[in-house]
Amino acid sequence: MINTLVTRWDDLVLALWQHIQLTTFALVIAAILAISLAIWALRHRRIAEIFLQITGILQTIPSLAVLALMIPIVGIGFPAALTALVVYALLPIFQNTYLGLSQVQPELIDSAAALGLPRNKILWKVRFPLATPNIIAGLRTATVMIVGTGTLAALIGAGGLGSFILLGIDRNDNNLLLIGAITSALLAILATLLIQIIGKTRGKLRWAIVIGLLGTITVGTFVPKLVSQQSSTVVIAGKLGSEPTILIEMYKDLIQADDPHVKVITKDSLGTTSFLYNALKSDDIDIYPEFTGTILSDIARKPVTLPKGASAETTYAAAKKVAKNLNLTVGKPTKFNDTYAIAVSSSVAKKYGLTTIGDLHKLPNASAGMTAEFLDRTDGWPGIAQTYDLTGIPTTSFDPTLRYQAIAQGKVSIVDAYSTDSQLKQYHLQVLQDDQRFFPAYQAVPLMKNAFAKKHPDYVQSLNKLAGKITDADMQEMNYLVNVKHEPASKVAKDYLVEHHILAR
């Protein structure tokens, strides 16, 4: 862990700073909204209960769902994560503030009124000082919730300590996972202590501390962004997994090799197809690696079904046609075909004589652990189950990496896979033959808007240098180096491009 910490120190500092920014702005905005609402509710107590119910309902919505719902509205990254976290922080702050202000003893209010204090001065001179412990408690609770839920922000490109946790899960690296989790916990503890200290200070000192902290974080957040906007920037994003991360690093290297002056930002592990596609439509990203088969099934307005056994060329041509209708540009495909596959452990395959997907009928007490996306796709498990008459096999949804651990631990006997997954080698799994030729071809292609491609034809040309490159074996080996050997994806990508003379050393 110490070695990992030293190696990733710069990344950790950046992730921590991003998490601090996100936590601070979410807490401040939520506090302003919730405290203002609580003050208003004092004069409209019948409506206060309704607000409590509404904020309570908002908090019951799964955090990942809230993040996903924000993408079409405010795009990916910081704005979406900030909005979702504000929603989650409203309840504890509003509830504690309202209860603290409303439960001040009536005798004290009457005494203040008898002394001639107007309602506003009673609020600020009597109610708020007495309600301060409640308000501070609400702020502390909200802070812990924001820091914890904020780790999911990495799924939509907002960065933060969640990037270490997601990377640790994806790469099966407990060191990365623990670094992210421990740092997040320490941040929550320190933040709540800071709020408690601010709550105990009085007068101008309290406001000086608050304004100083907010000023420092605001300057550190927006000034670098204003500076970076002065240069041309290309944002390239990738889905969860080592393979998309390797591809976006290749895209970055290829573009910068031909245009050293362009600034390329990569955002890895940005969720599933819907996350990336919405981000592309919203202009939050410029390019992302997609697969020809996915374009036909997930991105087309109506899923396109090709004849069984359709060639890779046919699939690519159909994907280009779909993209054209959506004002998108598809680059040229790589050679490897990262198609879906169904896998079982080698020992189980040998014991029951399993060689094809149809042979799964021989497997007693079969159970499948698969990704949520595969369980929902028409060209995923629903189609396979119908084609091979496997509808009776129970299925469980798993994180892409955890499904491999589930089969290794014997919790499930069947998993979905990609044909280039390093875990097939790592966990000694056997891919069953798709003898009905159900799965279409899945070749990687860079996907972008037509407007971007027309503005930057040289970037499209740079990315097309990967056309016909990278075999199945090459990609599986690169995935293995990243996932099992824990080599940086950027290094693995650069090494491949240099070794195959696509880039100069």
Image: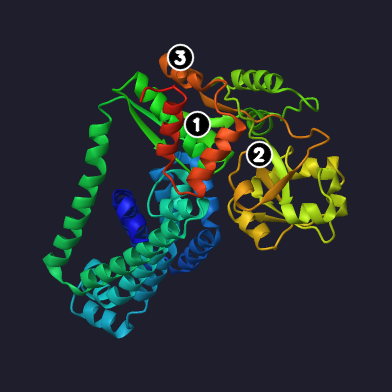
**Gap between marks 3 and 2, in whole Å?**
34 Å
Residue lying farthest bottom? Answer: 107
Q: Nearer the viewer, residue 297 or 485?
A: 485
- Picture quadrant of residue 395: bottom right
Q: Which mark, residue 419?
A: 2
Name the N-terminal-most of marks 1 and 3.
1
The residue carrying mark 1 is 288
Does residue 200 show up? yes
At label 1, counting other C-alpha atoms closer than 10 Å, the crowd grade (few under 14, some 14-19, many 20 or more) is many
> Residue 459, position in %: x, y?
42, 19
The residue carrying mark 3 is 454
Does residue 236 show up? no
Q: Which residue is depicted at the point 33% across and 48% down?
A: 11
Q: Which residue is depicted at the point 56% across and 35% down?
A: 475
Q: Which residue is depicted at the point 58% across and 39% down?
A: 476
Q: Amino acid at mark 1?
A: Tyr
Quadrant of the drawing holding the C terminus: top left
> Residue 145, position in %: x, y?
42, 64
Q: Amino acid at mark 2?
A: Ser
Q: Secondary structure at mark 1?
A: strand
**Gap between marks 2 and 1, in whole Å?**
20 Å
